[in-house]
Image (tube, helix red, strand yellow):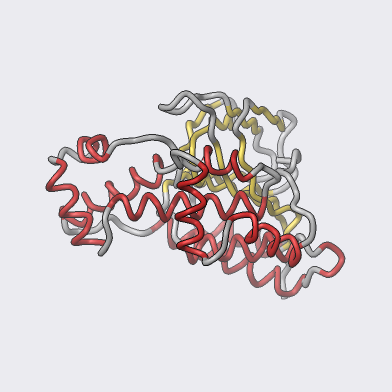
Amino acid sequence: MTEARLLICDYSYHSEPYCNSHKSGLTTYLFRLQTEGSCVASCNGKDYRLQAGDLLLLKPGDEYELRVTEEQSDGRISSGDYYIFCDGDWIDSWWKRVKRHKVNHISIDDHLLGLWRQLLLEKRRGPEEDLELIGYLLRGLCVCLDRAITETKPADRSAFTALRLKRFIEEHATVTFKLEEAAAHVGLSLSRAVQLFKACYGKTMIQYALEIRLNAAVERIKYSSMTLEEIAETCGFASYSYFHRVFRAKYGMAPVKFREAETAVTGSIAGSSELK
């Protein structure tokens, strides 16, 4: 079996200015998926402003710098992402199959993130990690990334407009935004946008935004050392008490109990890596 090596796999969230540079050129492949907020990635002298759903794909030799400095609409800094450093013969072969842009906007779905999270947790096992399992998961992720990149826009105009609404919510859920802003983004009245979104996805825009906020909170609880109060604030909840209430309703336990349970399973919670 040809080799696909996973060197680093992690999740990071930045709420303060951050900069990391590989100006001498990357020595491995880098896959980075922006899940919320925004940042600027400089690649071979060109700047790319990344927002939720933007997938950055870089190869060995590419110059790379990451900067998190931009304030969101509510005045705070926010940037969350999953990232992987990998190499191997299989990755080389996969990379050469098709020509891909450095930045590709994709739809973030649970299946894709599930693969990324499985890789992250398996890698965190350290000496107990299963290299064969990691190899298959990494291959699966690469194939799924290609599918996400090549997905065509829906032929139906209404469905495409609903998808644009969905992506707007994905990009802005963890900061303060109004439904009127989402509707204006796609050129619809608020009432029409609300009806269209519910018809296409079976839930309201508010319900979907809440799902994203809760998913972001779970990621921070599992993979960061932020306090629960900081997590509530950076995930778009108006207050900790509201966050506590909706979290308990969704997961059947308070956030502090959820973190205790996760810590018992995975060990001490690690902060974001500085190797990115």
Which of the pair 212/8 is nearer the observer? 212
Q: Is residue 257 above or below residue 47?
A: below
Q: Where is residue 74 shown, x and y percent of the image? A: 43, 27
For the N terminus, the image quarter is bottom right
Answer left or right for 150 relative to 133: left
The percent coordinates of residue 245 (x first, y second) are: 47, 54
Residue 176, quarter of the rendered image: top left
User: Residue 79: x, y in percent?
Assistant: 55, 37
Q: Residue at horizontal 48%, vertical 31%?
A: 49
Up/down of 248 relative to 105, above or below: below
View extreme (right): residue: 127
Residue at left offset 40%, top offset 42% = 171
Pick the residue in front: 101 or 121: 121
Q: Quadrant of residue 62?
A: top right
Q: Is residue 238 above or below residue 193?
A: above
Residue name at image x 71 percent, y 28 percent: 23
Q: Is residue 150 above or below residue 118?
A: above
Question: Relative to residue 44, is residue 185 drawn left or right?
Answer: left
- How many marks can you see? 0
Query: 86 and 157: which one is in front?
Result: 157
Q: Position of residue 136 (x, y in %)?
A: 65, 72
| Quadrant where the C terminus is found in the figure | top right
